[in-house]
Image: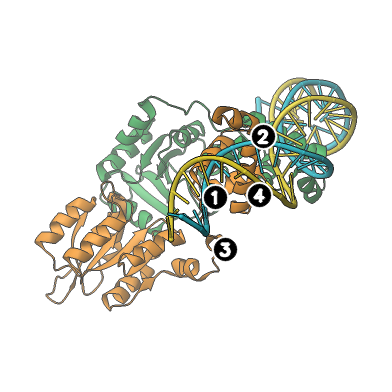
Chain colours: A orange, B green, C yellow, D cyan
Amino acid sequence: MSANKTDATLVIVDDHPIVIEGLQSLLQGEEGLHIVQSFTTGGAFLSFLKEQPHIDIVLLDITLPDLNGVEVCREIKIHAPDTKILIISNHNERSIIMQMLQQGASGYLLKNASGDELVHCIHEVLNGRIALSAEITAIMTRPVQNELKQIPHLTKREKQVLGMIAAGRTSASIADELCVSQFTVETHRRNLMQKFDASNTAALIKMAVEQRLL
Amino acid sequence: MSANKTDATLVIVDDHPIVIEGLQSLLQGEEGLHIVQSFTTGGAFLSFLKEQPHIDIVLLDITLPDLNGVEVCREIKIHAPDTKILIISNHNERSIIMQMLQQGASGYLLKNASGDELVHCIHEVLNGRIALSAEITAIMTRPVQNELKQIPHLTKREKQVLGMIAAGRTSASIADELCVSQFTVETHRRNLMQKFDASNTAALIKMAVEQRLL
DNA sequence: TAAAATATACCGGAAAACCAGTAGAAAAAA
DNA sequence: TTTTTTCTACTGGTTTTCCGGTATATTTTA
């Protein structure tokens, strides 16, 4: 690997040594790229970046032992706004991808991307474009399904009741513990189902878990 | 890389090309190891194994596009009982690790394991020992908390019914779709609740989600 | 092949959930 | 301080679940 002055400088941040090895191996023969260094923690990389801010592109994993991808992204953009960020992650949830792009990431690849795709995306990003792998593009462009229905707003009491329902309690037993009428609990239950657009308790609990409310 | 007759034969099965690259790269210089081939699906590997069963060790990812780790493990042990299995996974839940070991895996590494650890574990396994990385050992030895409740075994039909219950369907409607009696569905429902030790549908769904069965 | 697991089906009764309303008091927000 | 939201409570009726059995045919495993 030759390190010409005009080579783009690249850094890898991933807590999996195996992934780092893999990326390095895939990029070994690439013209015009110089892998400066690799890091397994966000902190180590950010310290490095403060000393040496002339990095063109960072291949960044989202799940790191110390900081999460959002934080790392923000720090990068503060200290080195011209450094491009290409996320390489296993997360394929639309919300996470969106979040990273909002933090200033220039691209997003899944770890099962091919070598060709990786190289292609790196060049796209270096040229100032947004680069998403085919799979990510598919996720981003396909109809949103259940993402339209935003998370319903629950009151404190409703959350409390929801939790107790999920624990398998009956309305009567919940009413008992909360020292309210059974009718009250049943009303809460009904309102919960309405808010989640669920036709019964089973669907309610499933929705609630899906939307991380349980 | 020399391929001596006495070299141990090794196969990599992982749906992430990058991980395969990384593993290959890490094992490149290793004496006594011969990387025969790599696969990104369980099915492809199993077909290969039936043709050529003289493989000493398989580096196996649990999450594959077609089959899951448990199924692949079982098949390996049926067709090539002497082939050692070293799991290389991101899952660090005690229950999953246990499950793989019960299926006959000889070792378990997290993907963030170091190259040294990987090589060491491969040799341990080839020598007939159980090899767990430091992190896995820690998980396995630390106090169990609430993990006593192991994941109940569900039959196909039960999984199917469970899914439909979670979707908010009533027993009658499920029976209708499956073209069986409502009584049958109710029996399945009852057995599901018993297996999960749940007192009603709400608890059942919560448990099922918690144990990643939904 | 024998034993175990799975899928099927039924009964009757009790308990709980679900539906569609209404409505007053208390607390929070405007 | 109004207005809105939240929490509370009730009626009356329908549907569904839950519980406790039992039982047979089929499929899988040992």
Picture coordinates of residue B79, whole percent (x, y) = 56, 40
Q: Mark 1 lies on which chain?
A: B
Residue receiving disc 2 = B192
Secondary structure beneath label 4: loop
Q: Is residue B19 left or right of residue C3?
A: left
Residue under pointer 1:
B51
Q: Residues within 10 Å of mark 2 (few under 14, many from 20)?
A: many
Q: How far apart, in angstroms, are the residues tagged by discs 1 and 2? A: 40 Å
C-alpha span from label 3 to label 4: 15 Å
Q: Mark 1 is on which residue type?
A: Glu
Q: Mark 2 is on which residue type?
A: Leu
Question: Identity of the amino acid at label 4?
Answer: Ala
Query: Viewed as shown, does residue A142 lie left or right of B11?
Result: right
Q: Which of B82 and B195 is in front in this view?
A: B195
Label 1 vs label 4: CA separation? 43 Å
Name the residue carrying label 3: A145
The circle on residue B167 is: 4
> Dots 2 and 4: beta carbons under 8 Å?
no
Q: Which of the two residues, A185 or B153, is positioned nearer the viewer here?
A: A185
